[in-house]
Amino acid sequence: MTIILDVPGGSMASRPAHFIWMLDCSGSMGVNGKIGELNFAIREAIPEMQQAAQSNPAASLLVRAISFASGASWHIQEPTPVDRFTWDDVHTYGATDMGAAFRMAAAALQTPPMPQRALPPVLALVSDGQPTDDWRSGLRAIDDTPWGKRAVRVAVAIGDDADKSMLKEFLGNPELEPLLAKNPRQLAAAIRWMSTAVVKEASAPKIEDATPANVSPVVPLTKDETDIW
Amino acid sequence: MANGMLLAGQTLITESGDRVTVAELFGSGGQGEVYRVRTPYGDRAVKWYYPQLADARQRQILEGLIHHNWNDDRFLWPQTVVMDPDATYPGFGYLMDVRPQRYHDLPALFRRDASVAATTLRTLVAAALHTVEAYFTLHSKGIAYRDINWGNIFFDPATGDVLVCDNDNAVVEGEAAAVAGTMDFMAPELVRGDKGARPGIQTDLHSLAVLLFLLLMNHHPLDGAQALQIRCMDEAAKRRMYGTHPLFIYDPADPANRPVPGEHPTVIATWGALPKILRDLFVKTFTQGLGTPSARVRESQWRDALSRVLDAITVCVSCGRQNMTQPEGPAPDCWKCGTTVQLPPKLEVVTGRGALRTRRGIRLDPKARVYAHHLVDDPERHDFTAVVGEMTEHPQQRGRFGLTNRTTRDWTVRRDDGTVQEVGPGRTVALRPGLLLEFGGGTEAEVHA
């Protein structure tokens, strides 16, 4: 809650930071309760996402979500201030039309509806399978928008069937890899990282000493992760 | 439930062999997660590094910091390394005290959050002063902090006390550490990645100045009209704004980056209420100091200026708001109601026995206090609990104020008619212009209208 303090000046000027979830709701996400794990992980991460957003008063984090399966649709269409953000479960409904989701995101990344000035948007993609539509043209549509081109992109591959090379192409940076989530704990860690570290990095970049530019974010390992898989 | 890398109930072991139990996750940052832990000597906090960052270099830095064995209540200093005794959790962390609840984060202040509603101009300036003194102490020991930013200083809105956290990037000047800094706070030469530029005490001074500007102005010193031309504030844009083309928003020689009315109302208001003595320091450090690290304003300069401004804070009689005033300067218009502030009489305190004497002017508004640091030449730190004297109202005559002796020693008062009187502990002396007060030890004070 913002109040008037007994000191000169109001609150700090801030820029909007748009965060868009793109979530795979294909039939296979219904197998072994993966969709349930995803809903749980996102819901769990909301308080930490709110905390991460609060740590940067120069950014106003706005969150929305696209689900894709047979076609794509806005699960949450209104860019929602993170402190008011709540999660309604996504449900599975067919194929893996990721290209449709990309085109939907691309339309949202035009100016307007994007404002004249903002922080780099974050595109967070979660998928467990192979796209079933023309995802390449969808990805090009994102790249063709000024905001899409500058977006910070992160991706989680759920399980072994996810198309990791495609996800890598989405990331658009040869140094970045999609996160791999093979169990609920890893999925929760990946979603939490996207909701916190990525949000912070996009709005207030930290720089490591040895590498002055292009720091790739650090992914926390989970304790039961082994070096062999 | 811990819900992080460590599990609630799990046991860790300190270097001295004490067993500590993980209780809950406090939060996560760029380098690791912080947990509350139970120890034989009460609750403490553990920062546990992400495995990729728990390397030999970080371990060495940590050992060095712990070796300093620093017991200063303004820092949450690493106390001992902790590890998993069964080695199933790779890596390590360190033990520190838990941050007391009275300390709030600076972003809450910048958002003007209700949790910091107790903040006043006095506590705000005091917080700036304490921040400067904390880093001064660190630097005077040859330690560079290297990642001064709004996330690692906490403050008490009621008193202005500060607590410096995340000290695990601090290293002895010249040594390497993992982090070069947070871009918005980094010295331009580091943002540009100039050859030979290293994070250290001299670059800390830039970060400190940015932090002070944010504290007092609630705005970034380089974020003006030029930033409005940037649509997407991404890393490349920040590199330009903070590295290759930094321009102070109030650079007297170049108005190209001035704040824009309607877009930057906060900084226009806060800069308008800032006394010249502080404006001058910001101008120096963000003009000459941007390109010439040796021209950056030093902590002792900030300390002296902030201390003088603190002594010159005056309450507007018309609306009751605290105002910063220029020491020795004319009365400003109140930032809140616009009425010209009525300057109360001033107590000029002179310390030091030799030829060089330090003069400090304390505005005697009804809540003014004289502190122990006023009575010494070069105080090591400002302690606002060490009250020596305070303004009090006459118990029978409303509106009649005097200075009450809160020490255990007599003061001596000399009037201009030549009469001398003792003011014992607990007694109050009415403050007439021309009155001379001897505090002892060569420190004396005179009241000026």
Image: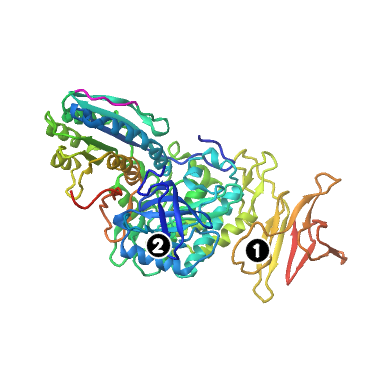
Chain of the residue under label 2: B
Residue B9 percent coordinates (x, y) = 42, 48
Quarter of the image for residue A90 reads top left
The residue shown at (48%, 61%) is B77
Chain of the residue under label 1: B
The residue shown at (68%, 63%) is B372
Residue A191 appears in the figure: yes
Say if the magenta span includes residue A90: yes
Decide which of A110, B99 is in the foreground and name it: B99
- Disc 1, SS: helix
Q: Which residue is identified by label 2?
A: B203
Quarter of the image for residue B225 reads top left
- Disc 2, SS: helix
- Range of residues picked out in magenta: A88-93
Say if the magenta span includes residue A66: no
Q: Which residue is identified by label 1?
A: B373
Residue A204 versus residue B298 in the image, above or below: above
Residue B179 percent coordinates (x, y) = 34, 58
The amino acid type of the residue labelled 2 equals Thr
Q: Characterize the magenta stretch by its predominant secondary structure.
A: loop
